[in-house]
Image (tube, rainbow, N blue to C red):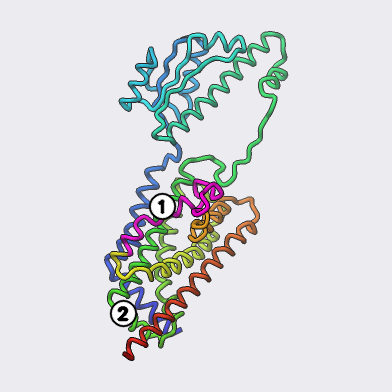
Amino acid sequence: MKLFKQILLREFKRFFTSKDLILICIIAPIVYSFGITYIYHKQNPRDIKIALVNQDNSAISRQYGRMINSTPELNIVDYFPSTYAAYNAIFTNKIDLFYFIPSDFSTNLKRAKSTFAFIGANASNFMVSSTAIKTIVMTSQFLAAQVSASFLIKNGISKNSAMQMIQPIKGNFKWMFNPTKTYANFFVPFVLFAIFQQILIVAVCHTMSLETQEKTWKDLYKITNNKIMPILFGKAIPYVCAALFMVLLFIFFVFPFNSIFQTSIINLLLLSLIYSFVIVFFAMLISHLFKSPVVSLCALTFYSMPVLLISGFAWPIYMLPSYLKIAAYIFPSTYFINIFRIYSLNTIWIGYATYCVLNLTVFFLICLILNFVIFKFKIAYTKKTDRL
């Protein structure tokens, strides 16, 4: 315990006297937490600029325009006489999309006939365009149902029968992991998760490669009498504390704008503690590949985003090519993301997370054992070179 304490105090001193580590582990998380969270504080796109090309100009088409404009997602900023003018408005960034209403729009609706409608959208910003199109489609269905019901009722069909005819199948949806279907609820946490993971890995590799560059591993071996575990855990704990600091930033700066987590803060902190140990020891393992902090920084610059993308965050792992499927399970974030989803619920049996936690634990033990073996080899090599 005494040896562990010596290494721990040495690493904390290194941490708080290093401008690089303070910048990486304290200042950067604060900047990212404020920046990303406040950028997406509205959670979903709101007041998307759209235009109408209304060639029908009937009471129903004008009602339809008012219905579209009353949604929180859409804001009609202009009306154009032709699609040509509407396209020009998209090209000049005045609007994000336009909706074309043909001249026979209301006539066909009243006769219960299908009617042609056209949407022109700037799909380069896919989140804005998909939200706008989804809202327009839902509004269209609601208007069509209203007009169809009125048509049936005028022809002597009761209101209940008319509603059953226009909606023969009633759906009851259960949205899991993101019940409010809010864009920021998953995007912001996962982006911050990727950034924090990157910060932690860079910081650990930085301090490990510094030991190599400054040739101070011998000092650690002497302090601990060649005992490996005090070195591993003594150097790991400060960065686990840094990881928990990032999680607390996440809780207090992201939570006010985000309703994704339904579990308790205690459970989230326990999960974060487990994952922090996994990431730190994984970072220790890959740090043996680098001989200097500069090399480690350059090599790890593009680590987190590709790893996050193949870990099942936005694209199912089973859809990946075979070599990427294998790669996905080499990185700990794959196992964490599955737990992350489960912890966003409060009505699910926590036992569902047991398998994922077990995977993380096994991953941690593998990293611990490999680090132990590598350090043992390094100590043996150091002794051999000292004799020579």
The secondary structure type at the circle numbered 1 is: helix
Q: Which mark is on residue 305?
A: 1
How far separated are the C-alphas under marks 1 and 2? Answer: 33 Å
- The image position of residue 72, as x and y in percent, is 46, 30
Quadrant of the image occupied by residue 4: bottom left
- Say if residue 336 shows up in the picture: no
Check whether the beta carbons of the residues at disc 1 and disc 2 lie within 8 A of each other.
no
Q: Is residue 157 left or right of residue 253?
A: right
Q: Is residue 369 above or below residue 278?
A: below
Q: 10 Å neighbourhood of mark 2: few (<14), some, or many (≥20)?
A: few
Residue drawn at x 38%, y 13% as measured from the top left = 82
The prevailing secondary structure element of the residues shown in magenta is: helix
Residue corresponding to mark 2: 216
Q: Amino acid at mark 2?
A: Thr
Residue at (48, 9) in percent of width and height: 103
Q: Is residue 62 above or below residue 40?
A: above
Which range is magenta? Answer: 296-324
For residue 345, say whether it is visible. Answer: yes
Instruction: In the rendered structure, find residue 178 and report the number of the disc placed on it.
Output: none
Left or right: where does residue 31 sit relative to residue 189? left
Query: Where is residue 134 shown, x and y percent of the image?
Result: 51, 30
| Amino acid marked by disc 1 | Met
In-front residue for pair 276/257: 276
Q: Nearer the viewer, residue 50 or 114?
A: 114
